[in-house]
Amino acid sequence: GSKISLTDAANGTLAKQSGISVTKTADGQLSYTIIPTEESSAEEGTGSESSLNTISTPRGGQYNVVLPDGTKIWLNASSSVSYPVKFKANERKVILTGEAYFEVAKKLKAESGGINGSDRERVPFIVNTRGQMVEVLGTHFNINGYADEPLIKTTLLEGSVRVSRNTSEEVILKPGQQSQIFSSRNNIKVVNADLKAEMAWRDNQFFFEDEPIETIMRQVSRWYDVDIVYKDDLKGKTVWGAVPRFSNISRVLRILELTGNVHFKIEGRQIIVMK
């Protein structure tokens, strides 16, 4: 039930729960590590395998998390991920809102009857977001599941993932492919992904290739914590371009205006979008 502001917290151990040490590292990430049995003490929290931690980023914020199994998660702005303090022996499951990039550790478990643990099985890693389930064993992928976006996009960079909907439909993605699920439909569409565009946020960039103005401005709103107001109907207008994401918002808007398709006016924390 407690909240910790990672921006304000000093580096070092923040909590101990269920045999897990939660640490803020000097390079700006949250790390979960297993405490050796001899170091565990009665001072630890009373969490269990069912205890959930949630890390949330505000608009304009990013954060990295390393889970106890070694899985690394990069959270984009205005996103959150919930996960057990300690994974179950046969399942690793997290819940995502917003956007995150995952590098899933290939966690193995020893099966009974094996010789020195030689009979081993990979423990599935599952990500739930907006009615979509992604199941992986060890892979690199990105999920964009913001509630204000018209579709959920899962982009695979390495390995293999199974994407399923609340229906019986499921698809297996290959590296370079992207699944798309529209809120208004149940079917899953698979396309070849534009990896440079999908992963630009990890490189602190906005990168647009014929993107609708509305899509771009949702990204700008999340990163710069501004409200977007449309003075004119700009449906069908698209933009090409790239700009560092940490640039001043005025520079971003100026570069977008160079396309000739759109103009902007800044009024306080509002961005007025015009033809």
Image (tube, rainbow, N blue to C red):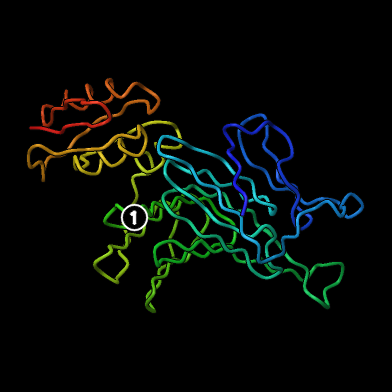
Q: So how many labels did they put on this image?
A: 1
Q: Which residue is mark 1?
A: 147
Q: Is residue 261 above or below residue 138?
A: above
Give the quadrant of residue 4.
Answer: top right
Left or right: 275 in relation to 83: left
Q: Residue furthest right?
A: 38
Q: Residue at x 44, y 54 (%)?
A: 97
| x then y, percent, for residue 272 | 16, 32
Judged from the image, the secondary structure of the residue bearing numbered disc 1 is loop
Quadrant in which the N terminus is drawn: bottom right
Left or right: 70 in relation to 7: right
Q: Is residue 217 above or below residue 241?
A: below
Quadrant in which the C terminus is drawn: top left
| x then y, percent, for residue 235 | 11, 45
Who is closer to the viewer here, 254 or 114? 254
Q: Residue furthest front?
A: 1
Who is closer to the viewer here, 93 or 162? 93
Q: Residue at x 28, y 25 (%)?
A: 252
Give the quadrant of residue 53.
Answer: bottom right
Q: Residue at x 39, y 71 (%)?
A: 165
| x then y, percent, for residue 10 | 67, 31
Who is closer to the viewer here, 70 or 17? 17
Dot 1 surroundings within 10 Å: few (below 14), some, or many (20 or more)?
A: few
Say what amino acid the circle numbered 1 marks: Ala
| x then y, percent, for residue 27 | 63, 30
